[in-house]
Image (spheres, grey):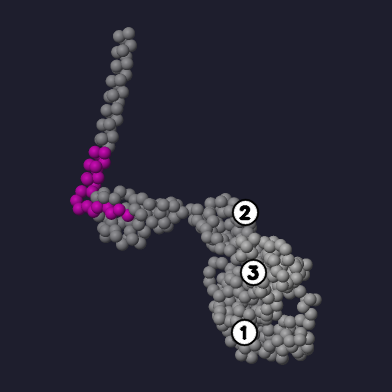
Amino acid sequence: MARKESCLLIILKMLLMLVLLIALIIAGVFYIRDFLNEYFNRGETIEVPDFRGKHLVEVFKEKPADLMIEKRDEKCDPRYPKDHVIAQYPEPGTRVKKNKKVLLTISLGSKQVTVPDLTGKSTRESALSLLNAQLKEGNHAYFFSTKVPRDHIVTQSPLPFSTQSVNGSVDLLISLGPAPVRGFLPNLAGKSINDAKKVLSDCGLKLGKLLYKKDSVHEPDRILSTKPSPYEVVNDGTTIDVLLSSLTTQSSPEEMKKFSVLDNSVSLTVPDKPEKPSTSNDDDNPEVPVKPKSTGIEPPKIILPGEDKTATKKPSVESDASENNPSGENKPSGKPENKPEGKAESGETTYVTFTMPDGFMAKEVKFLLVSPQGRQEVYSDTHKPLDQIKVKVPKVPDGKVQVYINNILVEELSL
C-alpha cells in the first residue's frame, strides 16, 4: 500500500513541475517579445491610434504623418459598413518607430445577393422567393389594377436581378384587383317590392332586409325609404334594406332608426337625379345608377375640387337633348354620339406628351380633356417611373389637357 501511494505522489510532483515549466516558458516569451520590441523600437516612438470602426477617409485624415497605412485584407462583415476598419495591427496604444506600417482589415459590408424577379407572383410565392434569396419583405403598397390579379406583385424595389445586402428589404407594390364598380343608389320610393327587385338587379345590387311601418296614406307594400339612402354612392353587390308601408305590421323603432323617413308625411315623388337624361317612359326604363364623383379609389371619372358635385361624367348628345328637350323626345343634334361639345367639326387632333416622374413604383395616370363645355377622360393607364406617354387628343377651342397621377393634378397643358 505504501508503495502505491509513493507512485501517485511522484506523478503529482511531475505534473506540478510541468505546469511550472509551461508558465515559465510563457512568461519568457512575453518578456523576450517586450525586450525585442523595445530594442527594435528604441529611440523616438509614436503611439498607434485606434482606427477600428472608422472609414478609410477618416483614417488617413487622423493618422500621424510618420505612420504608414497599408491594407492587409478585405472581408464581408455585417457589423461594419463598406470601407470601414474591422481590425488593425499593431494594436491601438502600441508604441512604434517612425514610418512603421499599420496593417488594416477592411470591411466589404454585408454579403451581396441577387434580388429575384417577383413580378406577377402571388404574395405567398414572393415571400418564399425572398426567403430563399436571404432577403425579407419591406414596405407594402397597394392599388387597384385590371391587368394584375388580386394579391399578386405589380412591381418591386430594388428591381429584379440587382444586388442587395443579405437580410436586406425588398419593397412591393401589390394589386388589389379590379376596382369595385360604384354608382348612385336609385330612388326606389313609391315602387312595389317586385319593381324594386328588378331595378336593384339591373344595377348590380341586392335586396336586403324588409322592414314595415304602419301607414294609412300609401298603398300597402310600397317602399317608403331605403338604407343606404337614395343617391348615396354604393359598390356593386351592396345589400339594400327597404322600409315598406303596411296597414297592420310595424317593425321595432330601433330597426327603423336607420331610415331617414319615419313619419306619415313621406313624399314618394322621385327627386331630381344628378344630371340623368330623362326618357319618354320611366316604367320601361328602370333607373340605372350613374357614375359617382371621385372617391380616391381608382374612380372612372375625376371631378376636380370646387366643381359642381352633380356634374355629368362627360358632355354628350344624350345629356344635351335631355336638358333642352324635357319631354324626353330624342331629336337629332347633328353631332356624333359622345362627342364633347366644342370639338372641332373638322376632326382635327393633336398630340400631348408627358414624362412620368422618377420613383420606384408604377402609378395610375389619367388625361382629362377640359373645355368650357365640359370634361372628358381621354386616356387612363398605369405607367412606371420615367415612362414617356404620348396621347392623341382632339383640338377643342379654349381646351386644355389636365394630367392626374393617382387622382392628383400634376400638370395642365393648353391645346
In the image as oriented, which residue stretches furthest toward the right? 284
Residue 209, position as x, y percentages in the image: 69, 61
Residue 76 visible, this angle: yes
Q: Few, some or many C-alpha atoms within 10 Å of disc 2 (few <14, some 14-19, many ≥20)?
A: some
Indicate whether 129 appears above or below 378: above
Question: Where are the magenta residues, as a range?
Answer: 30-51
Q: Nearer the viewer, mark 1 or mark 3?
A: 3
Observer-side mark, 1 or 2, equals 1
What secondary structure is found at the residue carrying circle 2? helix
Amino acid type, label 2: Glu
Q: CA distance from mark 1 to mark 2?
A: 44 Å
Which residue matches tag 1?
A: 370
Element marked by disc 1 = strand
Within-10-Å neighbours for mark 3: few <14, some 14–19, many 20+: some
User: Is 38 contained in the magenta span?
Assistant: yes
Mark 3: which secondary structure? loop
Quadrant in which the N terminus is drawn: top left
Q: Amino acid at mark 1?
A: Val
Pointer 3: what residue?
262
**Residue in the image at 64% along x and 85% along y:** 374
Identified by mark 3, the residue type is Leu
Give the residue pinned by disc 2: 125
Label 3 vs 2, first from the N-terminus: 2
Find residue 198 and report its image quarter: bottom right
Query: For the point 30% across and 13% down, which residue is it?
Result: 6
Q: Is residue 40 left or right of residue 126?
A: left
The numbered mark, 1 or 2, whose residue comes first in the sequence reads: 2
Residue shown at the point (28%, 56%) measured from the top left: 67
Residue 387: x and y in percent read 59, 73
Looking at this view, is 234 or 89 the one in front? 234
Quarter of the image with the C terminus in it: bottom right
Mark 1 Cα shell of 10 Å, populated few (<14), some (14-19), many (≥20): many
